[in-house]
Amino acid sequence: MNAALPPTLTTHLVSVVADADPGLLARLSGVLARLEILPLQIYSRLHQDAERRGGQADDNSAHLEIDLYLSAASAGNKDRLVALLRAMVGVESVATSA
């Protein structure tokens, strides 16, 4: 169920790349709850690092790519959210859309 969201609802996208740690999604959810942000959609993909680095990764290395679609109502907390996500253990990068 990867239906596109109406453009009027989605104003911001926050993309996170992180280690494939079982507790990472729970910690990310905790940050969202603390800031009282309810995303319109969360999409998470597990990738083996070999896919990202041209087939030269360890057998057990993997990473998560997580996209958070935020409403206009959440825009006021976006900068704080990004700062908290970047400070999380295991997070490699956080990117945002305008």
Image (cartoon, rainbow, N blue to C red):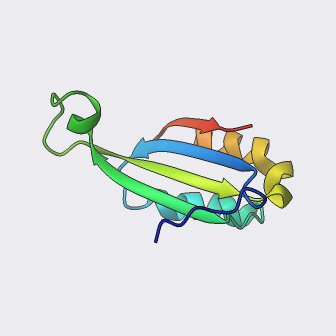
Please state the horizontal and vertical placement of residue 60, each as a whole percent of the image. Answer: 17, 46
The number of numbered badges drawn on the structure is: 0
Residue depicted at 54% across the width and 51% down the height: 67
Image point 65% across, 47% down: which residue? 13
Left or right, 39 with respect to 77, comes to left
| Vertical position of residue 57 compared to residue 27: above or below | above
In this rendering, is residue 77 above or below 25?
above
- Which residue is found at the position 15% from the left and 36% from the top? 58
Visible residue check, residue 89: no
Which residue lies most toward the bottom here? 1
Residue 84 image position (x, y, % from top left): 67, 45
What is the quadrant of residue 38 in the picture? bottom right
Q: Is residue 35 left or right of residue 27?
A: right
Q: Quadrant of the C terminus?
A: top right
Residue 63, by quadrant, is top left
Q: Is residue 62 visible?
A: yes
Q: Position of residue 51 (x, y in %)?
A: 24, 37
